[in-house]
């Protein structure tokens, strides 16, 4: 358990700049106001644009035939090791577009808290390959990238640190009930 926590801590540390590389992050902190909510948005709506990262609403795929667009809001119920605000959603996907970052993203990291107990139906896509409906760790390669996922089980769900390497334009992730924090793209 200690080793897993340490791995998550190392993987999840935001804004780790490499020696020469640039990085951008979205951490959902102030000036984003606690409680800000996006409801009933059409697919493709850009709800946030920070440091060249656009965040768009996309449909959550419950299965191959049914999709939903639920609610997203800024919450102060933190994810362990990630103090501060998070973005929280229900039956909705969030698409992160890194093409405005001013550099080609070669690595993306994010922390995903699945709060829907027993769920296997997380949605996940990289570079438009998906959304796949399964646990995040079900796809070690996606959209021409390599995906590493470290997960710990928590009361009522799980926390996953996702690290994607390769050329990354977009990452889409969502679920029935989830929170996200510290989405970072590195050069
Ligand atoms: Ca945060």
Image (cartoon, rainbow, N blue to C red):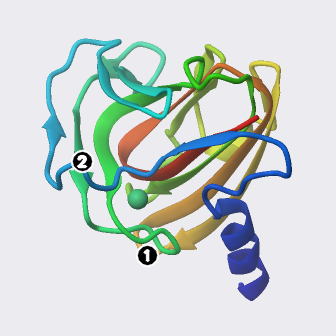
**SS of the residue at dot 1?**
loop
Q: Which residue is mark 2?
A: 32
Q: Is residue 23 above or below residue 16?
A: above
* Residue occupying image coordinates x 65% and y 64%: 13
* Residue occupying image coordinates x 24% and y 57%: 75
Considering the image in quadrants, where does the C terminus appear?
A: top right
Q: Is residue 131 left or right of residue 60?
A: right
Q: Quick one: 186 or 76, which is closer to the camera?
A: 186
Gap between marks 2 and 1 measured at Cα: 28 Å
Label disc, if present, on residue 155 of the rendered structure: 1
Which percent across, then down, holds residue 163?
72, 46
Q: Residues within 10 Å of mark 1 (few under 14, many from 20)?
A: few
**SS of the residue at dot 2?**
loop
Which percent across, then down, holds residue 138?
72, 40
Q: Is residue 117 left or right of residue 1?
A: left
* Residue occupying image coordinates x 33% and y 48%: 87
Mark closer to the chain start, 2 or 1: 2
* Residue occupying image coordinates x 23% and y 31%: 70
Q: Dividing the image into four equal quarters, which quarter contains ligand 1?
A: bottom left
Front of the two marks 2 and 1: 2
């Amino acid at each position: 358990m200690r080793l897993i926590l340490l791995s998550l801590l190392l993987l999840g540390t935001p804004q780790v700049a490499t020696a020469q590389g640039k990085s951008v992050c979205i951490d959902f902190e102030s000036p984003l106001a606690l409680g800000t909510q996006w409801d009933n948005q059409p697919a493709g709506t850009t709800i946030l644009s920070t440091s060249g990262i656009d965040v768009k609403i996309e449909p959550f795929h419950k299965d191959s035939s049914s999709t939903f667009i639920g609610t997203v809001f800024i919450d102060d119920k933190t994810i362990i090791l990630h103090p501060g605000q998070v973005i929280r959603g229900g039956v909705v996907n969030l698409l992160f577009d890194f093409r405005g970052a001013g550099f080609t993203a070669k690595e993306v990291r994010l922390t995903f808290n699945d709060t829907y107990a027993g769920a296997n139906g997380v949605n996940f896509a990289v570079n438009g390959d998906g959304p796949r409906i399964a646990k995040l760790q079900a796809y070690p390669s996606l959209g021409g990238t390599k995906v590493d996922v470290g997960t710990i089980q928590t009361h009522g769900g799980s926390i996953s640190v996702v690290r994607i390497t390769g050329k990354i334009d977009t990452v889409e992730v969502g679920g029935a009930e989830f929170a996200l924090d510290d989405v970072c793209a590195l050069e």
